[in-house]
Image (tube, rainbow, N blue to C red):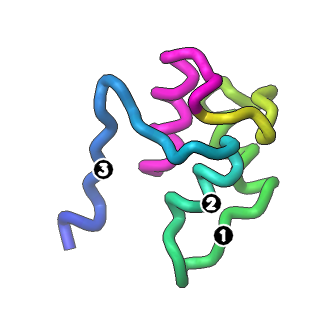
């Protein structure tokens, strides 16, 4: 039970080679339902990334943006 509630975000996060939207949807996992755009936007806004274009590739983000997207994934 505890393992399900603990997340880990490394100093240098690794994302899938896709868009931010695809990366967040992948993190949700198969069978748990995809995050809708509104849900993704709300989570990104909580970490100061509300204006981030979902169509941008994860590997094209700055290091800080990648870390914040990784935090959203872990949430």
Seen from this angle, which residue lies furthest left? 2
Q: From the image, which quarter does the N terminus lie in?
A: bottom left
Image coordinates for residue 44, horizontal then vertical, percent? 66, 37
Q: Mark 1 and mark 2: span between their CA atoms?
A: 5 Å
74 inside magenta stretch: yes
58 inside magenta stretch: no
The residue drawn where x is 57% and y is 29% is 59
**Label 2: element kind:** helix
The residue drawn where x is 51% and y is 17% is 64
Q: On the rendered structure, is 9 left or right of 63? A: left
Residue ID for mark 2: 25
- The label on residue 68 is none
Residue ID for mark 1: 34
Vertically, is 41 above or below 57? below
Q: Residue 6 lies in what quarter of the image?
A: bottom left
Decide whether the magenta segment is chiefly helix, strand or loop: helix
- The label on residue 7 is 3
Which residues are drawn in magenta? 59-75
């Amino acid at each position: 039970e505890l393992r399900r509630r603990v997340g880990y975000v490394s100093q240098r996060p690794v994302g899938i080679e896709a868009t931010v939207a695809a990366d967040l949807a992948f993190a949700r996992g198969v069978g748990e339902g995809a995050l809708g755009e509104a849900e993704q936007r709300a989570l990104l806004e909580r970490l100061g990334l509300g204006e981030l274009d979902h169509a941008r590739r994860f590997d094209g983000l700055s290091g800080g943006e990648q870390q914040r997207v990784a935090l959203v994934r872990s949430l």
